[in-house]
Image (spheres, rainbow, N blue to C red):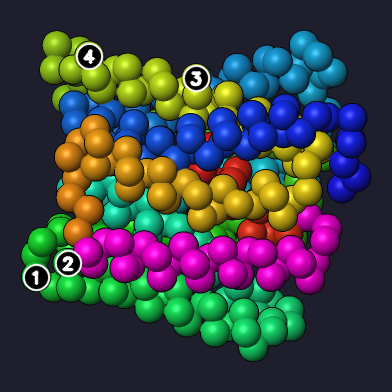
Amino acid sequence: MSKDRSASAAAIWIALGLVYVIWGSTYLAIAIAVQTLPPLFSAGLRFCIAGLVLLAWVAARRGVHVGRKELNGALIVGLLLLVGGNGFVVLAERTVPSGLTALIIASVPLWIVLLRRLAGDRIHPSTFAGVVVGFGGVAFLVVPRGSSGEVDGAGLVMLLVATTSWAFGTFFASRLRMPSDGLLSAALQQLAGGFVLVLAGAAIGELGSLDAARYSTSSLLAMAYLVVFGSLVAFTAYSWLLQHAPVSLVATYAYVNPVVAVLLGALVLAEPITPSIVVGAAIIVVAVAFIVTRDHARRRPRGTAARAAAAQAD
């Protein structure tokens, strides 16, 4: 993708800062939202609202033009990213701290490397070494906490499912025919994922327990934050960056977001930052940073690792 060099450095860094902070903060917002809101139904409603707003904006500005194959591609990716990915995250964050959640999800680029190898791509041995180190960091965080009961084991399993689903969605996004308009693609993905999440919430009985009197103000504000900032502002900034900045720079969100999430979880929800959290976080972040920067140094065009941001339009 060619870049419009007319954008100022200040504008690029402002947009990058929005992606860093807002997407890093969505884990905290989700943790607050699910304290009183039905997780799947509220997540589905959030994506439906954001998808409709994006679709209306695209329709008003340039019209909606999408072929059947492009539509099918967007729907498949949306289901993988938002239903399999975000759906299991919101379920897991009922019992798993938001900072730990972000660190586990940060391993998405590691899974993408494995999927690329299974698809026949040639992967440099040093990249595989980075994957092994990164997964070692994930195991260092997950295994002791799950086996000791410090963190809900079912929640940790849900996060591993979410991570692999996000990786599959990101991987297929570069191989399926997708709408050329990035905002239209995002709108269709969010509408597909949101609709299925609402149905899933209804299927497990969330609609039967809807009671506005039980919803806290903080949860409702968190929901509004996720819709406006997580799904609209940050994603718009990300889409703009892909047109005006090197993808290797945009991809730095992959290892900045979890750091932001851990710090916010500690400051707002008093989630502990133990020495083992620091060590595990350092292992994962360094491994992911190595893989992302090496990947984009070898492949200047749009890389699959950067596409993981679309999965975190949280």
Q: Mark 1 highlights which residue? A: 148
C-alpha separation, residue under disc 2 versus residue under disc 1:
5 Å
Magenta stretch: includes residue 171 = no
Tell which residue pokes out farthest to the front in this image: 10
- Give the class, few, some or many, for how many residues have Cα within 10 Å of label 3's Cα (few <14, many ≥20): some
What range of the chain is rendered magenta? 275-302
Magenta stretch: includes residue 282 = yes
Q: Nearer the viewer, residue 253 or 96?
A: 253
Three-letter code for the amino acid on which mark 2 is drawn: Arg
Three-letter code for the amino acid on which mark 1 is drawn: Ser
First in sequence, mark 4 or 1: give its number.
1
Q: Position of residue 199 (x, y in %)?
A: 38, 34
Q: Residue at x 66, y 64 (%)?
A: 293
Secondary structure, mark 4, is helix
C-alpha separation, residue under disc 1 versus residue under disc 3:
38 Å
Are dots 3 and 2 in contact, CB under 8 Å? no
Q: Residue at x 47, y 46 (%)?
A: 257
> Residue 292 lies in what quarter of the image?
bottom right
Secondary structure, mark 3, is helix
Secondary structure, mark 1, is helix
C-alpha separation, residue under disc 4 versus residue under disc 2:
31 Å
Q: Residue at x 22, y 53 (%)?
A: 273
Q: Mark 2 highlights which residue? A: 145
Circle on res. 129: none
